[in-house]
Image (cartoon, rainbow, N blue to C red):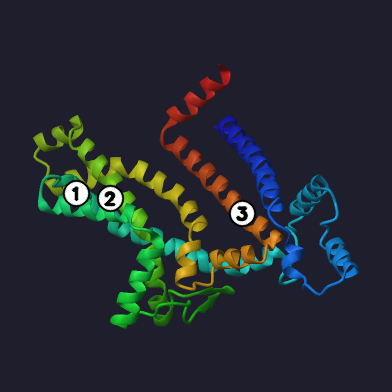
Amino acid sequence: MLDFLIRRLLQSVLVLVAMSVLVFIGIYAIGNPIDILLSPDADQMERARIIAAFGLDRPLWQQYFLFIQNALAGDLGRSFAFGTPALDLILERFPATMELAVSAILIAIVLGIPLGLLAGLYPRGWIGRSIMTVSILGFSLPTFWVGLMLILIFGVQLGWLPASGRGETVAVFGVPLSFLTVDGLKHLLLPAFNLALFNIALVIRLVRAGAQEALLQDYVRFARAKGLSNTRIIGVHVLKNILIPVVTVIALQFGSIIAFAIVTETVFAWPGMGKLIIDSIRVLDRPVIVAYLMLIVVLFVFINLIVDVVYSLLDPRVRLSDAEGARG
């Protein structure tokens, strides 16, 4: 197990290094932020002073190694637009994005698993067909369009829920949270459901396929032969065996939800990292963009590492096959 963990850690470090190069070169090769930040009336001396102050007069490779040196010390640069550390700006918005992502995952689990079981148990009935039709819509409809429709229906026409903002928050250990207040929860429902829609459809399809496959297995037939009730068979034998791949996919999707919450946060004016990165892209605030992308990369690598370790604990064959491949 120790060899397996060390190998995964080394692979994670290599991925981080490779992604840091790609992210840095990709972002710093796009446009010139000085053209946006400086007034058109600025003279050449002022322009040269700002370029030197931001370190943009150095070769790209020097800028990269300076970025790595500072990043190892916890400094991902200072925002061109705000003049404050980029990491502080992102971490200030991080709780709002995490709250939205966690809420979306919980909605996907609470709705997706029971609906997927129903679709798997009654694949030819109207219930199963209706659920699968809804899942197709969840995959097909654009997130921004669904968000606008939710705002139009529940926010404008019915007036049940607020259409934008985060609402009232309560600080817990210095972290502002919305779901602990009634007003904050109302503001959270629409963007969380909009962000969860794709994952609800994904969980439905995973659970449905797993349930149909599990119902054909010998251990389910044996349980029925023993006279166990359908509730016990489904709840213990079927659900237990299909949850491992579902949990794995959900864990991996969590990183995707955080990364791709940009559209939902923009539509609902949710004050998270996504809205910050959109505003930073408009003014080519490179340090904020790079810091955001590197944080997303670290999250993805960390989540994948945790999933690999958990999977190896649940299924020792993963460690054995990895070790055999390394020896080969």
Nearest to the observer: residue 54 or residue 42 = 42
- In the image, residue 269 sits, relative to residue 289, either above or below, namely below
Amino acid type, callout 3: Leu
The residue that mark 3 highlights is: 293
Q: Which residue is drawn at the image coordinates 87% and 61% (left, top)?
A: 52
Of helix, strand and loop, which one carries label 1?
helix
**Mark closer to the chain start, 2 or 1:** 1
Q: Would residue 178 be found to the left or right of residue 201 on screen?
A: right
| Distance of label 2 from label 1 (alpha carbons) | 8 Å
The residue that mark 2 highlights is: 204
**Mark closer to the chain start, 3 or 1:** 1
Could you tell me residue 45's position as x and y percent? 91, 68
Q: Is residue 323 visible to us here? A: yes
The residue that mark 1 highlights is: 119
Q: Which residue is drawn at the image coordinates 32% and 45% (left, top)?
A: 243
Q: In the current view of this chain or complex, which residue is farthest to the front?
A: 41
- In the image, residue 295 sits, relative to residue 179, either above or below, namely above
Of helix, strand and loop, which one carries label 2?
helix
Amino acid type, callout 2: Ile
Q: In the current view of this chain or complex, which residue is farthest to the top?
A: 328
Q: Would residue 19 be found to the left or right of residue 196 on screen?
A: right
Of helix, strand and loop, which one carries label 3?
helix
Amino acid type, callout 1: Ala
Nearest to the observer: residue 214 or residue 55 = 55
Q: Is residue 193 visible to us here? A: no
Query: Are circles 2 and 1 on residues that touch, CB within 8 Å?
Result: yes
